[in-house]
Image: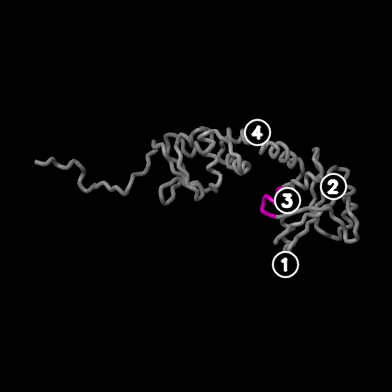
């Protein structure tokens, strides 16, 4: 005599389907902007004050949508997310794309990683030196936007665009600039400075070049001279030409 089937009628097990991973499951699959990662809850919660720990906080369902395959979806470029996971797993700092990983660490609020990257040789000069200098140049970011906008306006049917940049190192240069500006024949000029910090006008031009090229443009600078051959002061300021190459 066979024993009765103890399974509930109508509920057949399906080997092809799996129930969603419960909150206690240690393995988590992530889709970060199309990049797929497999990690653990303990790794994501390694730093309790981070944004990742908040997303997967203990005792609550993850505060994220899922993709078509049930992976938790983070709507952000995942190119450098692997470096964040690597640090959470091993405390190992990245050796490539350090600035990009630093930006991701800021976004996910992994403060230990942020601090260690700030102290690294790759970022120390950028954050302590260059960025601190830029912060002392009035309206630097706004003027950078104007610079790019003027260059793009001059790009129609042209291979190069030239934008006149005035670099004023000191307050005393302001009066001298007014005299030089009279020779520009109504050309638009983007002015930077003055500032109170040791770096020179060339240092500032290098900063401008770095930040413009970080946006994908190809640029160079040179001293500006008028059509009459007059070369404006260039030892530590005044007028330069920033040249964009489009093709």
- The image's mark for residue 144 is 3
Q: CA distance from mark 4 to mark 3?
A: 28 Å
For label 2, the residue is 237
Q: Residues within 10 Å of mark 3 (few under 14, many from 20)?
A: some
For label 4, the residue is 119
In which quadrant is the C terminus drawn?
bottom right
- The image's mark for residue 157 is 1
Q: Are marks 3 and 1 in contact (CB under 8 Å)?
A: no
Q: CA distance from mark 3 to mark 1?
A: 23 Å
Reply above or below: 151 against 25.
below
Is residue 105 rendered to the left or right of residue 15? Answer: right
Reply above or below: 236 against 47.
below
Question: Reading the chain from its start, which is encountered first: label 4 or label 2?
Answer: 4
Residue 212 belongs to the span the image colors magenta:
yes
Q: CA distance from mark 2 to mark 1?
A: 31 Å
Question: Reading the chain from its start, which is encountered first: label 4 or label 3?
Answer: 4
Is residue 79 rendered to the left or right of residue 181? Answer: left
Question: Reading the chain from its start, which is encountered first: label 3 or label 1?
Answer: 3
Rendering coords of residue 111 (x, y %): 58, 34
Question: Reading the chain from its start, which is encountered first: label 4 or label 1?
Answer: 4
Which portion, as a residue range, is magenta?
Answer: 210-217
At numbered mark 4, what does the secondary structure look like: helix, strand or loop?
helix
- Point out the frontmost of discs 3 and 1: 1
């Amino acid at each position: 005599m066979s024993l009765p089937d103890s399974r509930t009628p109508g509920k057949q097990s399906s080997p092809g389907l799996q129930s969603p991973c419960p909150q206690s499951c240690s393995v988590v699959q992530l889709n970060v902007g199309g990049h797929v990662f497999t990690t653990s809850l303990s790794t994501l919660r390694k730093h309790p004050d981070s944004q990742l720990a908040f997303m997967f906080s203990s005792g609550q369902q993850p505060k994220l949508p899922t993709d078509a395959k049930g992976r938790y979806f983070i709507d952000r470029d995942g190119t450098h997310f692997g470096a964040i996971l690597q640090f959470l797993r091993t405390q190992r700092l990245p050796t490539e794309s350090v600035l990009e990983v630093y930006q991701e660490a800021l976004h996910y609020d992994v403060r230990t990683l942020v601090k260690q990257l700030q102290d690294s040789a790759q970022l120390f000069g950028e954050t302590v030196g260059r960025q601190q200098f830029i912060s002392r140049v009035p309206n630097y970011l706004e003027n950078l936007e104007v610079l790019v906008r003027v260059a793009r306006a001059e790009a129609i049917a042209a291979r190069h665009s030239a934008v006149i940049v005035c670099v004023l190192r000191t307050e005393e240069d302001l009066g001298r600039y007014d005299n030089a500006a009279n020779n520009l024949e109504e050309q638009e000029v983007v002015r930077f400075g003055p500032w109170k910090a040791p770096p020179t006008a060339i240092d500032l031009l290098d900063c401008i070049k770095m930040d413009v090229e970080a946006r994908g443009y190809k640029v160079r600078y040179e001293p500006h001279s008028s059509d009459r051959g007059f070369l404006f002061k260039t030892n530590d300021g005044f007028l330069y030409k920033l040249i964009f190459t489009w093709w």
